[in-house]
Image (cartoon, grey):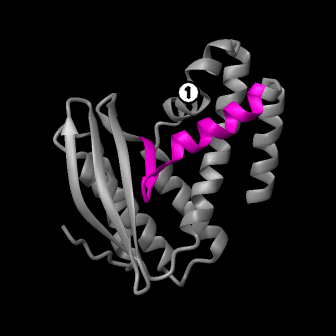
Amino acid sequence: MKHVVFCALLGYITMQGVLFGAENQASLSPEKTLQLRLDAAVAVLRDDRLDLEAKGDRITEIVSPLFDFPLMGKLALGPKHWPQFSKQQRAEYHELFTAHLKKAYRKKLMLYTDEEIVYKSAVTKAAKAEVLTELVSKENQIEVLYKLRRIEGKWKIYDVKVQGVSLRKSYEAQFHDILSRGTPADLFAALRDQKEEIE
């Protein structure tokens, strides 16, 4: 299904006030959950009345509720390293990982120019779903697959594949490399450094 994104300020204000509230409804599909948030984010990016800082802050508010940060962090750490972290280390890791992921996703979205999001297909099995999209511009088409799970009545992203490359697996490989040669403190330092580089 091809969906054209509207860029009027009134449009995304209406989405926030009315449609985002609909996410509490059990009938809302994973595709619709994703579409409402992403289209609203694109509307902000297309609004010339907002400066870059305001756009970034607004996008973070709109998109962050889509992500299951606790699960993404646990999966990125991997089954080998997660059990080895203490409760305190897990808490510090989640804080750093979530902050890093928010900054990274915000930076990627700020690179948006004239692309259109095309929603191609959605497959739902019990409490999990996959939504296939394409980011289409005049120059190319980029396939983005979102993996979601239903938690507390809401659909949330736990992995993203861009052109077949899994975000979770990419982080897992990076973190495994650091932890196999060092300690959790080394991973925390790396996450802090990456966050500063993104900023």
* x and y percentages locating residue 65 in the rendered image: 45, 45
Is 169 inside the magenta-drawn segment?
yes
Q: Quadrant of residue 15?
A: bottom left
Quarter of the image for the C terminus: give it: bottom right
Q: Residue at x 83, y 32 (%)?
A: 186
* x and y percentages locating residue 28 in the rendered image: 21, 45
Q: Residue at x 76, y 50 (%)?
A: 194
- Residue 95, placed above or below residue 21: above
Q: Residue at x 78, y 25 (%)?
A: 184
Q: Quadrant of residue 56?
A: bottom right
What residue did someone put label 1 on?
74
From this viewpoint, is residue 163 visible? yes
Left-right relation of 189 to 154: right
Category of crowding for the residue at label 1, using alpha-carbon neighbours closer than 10 angstroms: few (below 14), some (14–19), many (at least 20): some
From this viewpoint, is residue 13 visible? no
Left-right relation of 198 to 157: right
Residue 166 or residue 11, whichever sits in front:
166
Identify the magenta region: 158-180
The type of residue carrying mark 1 is Lys
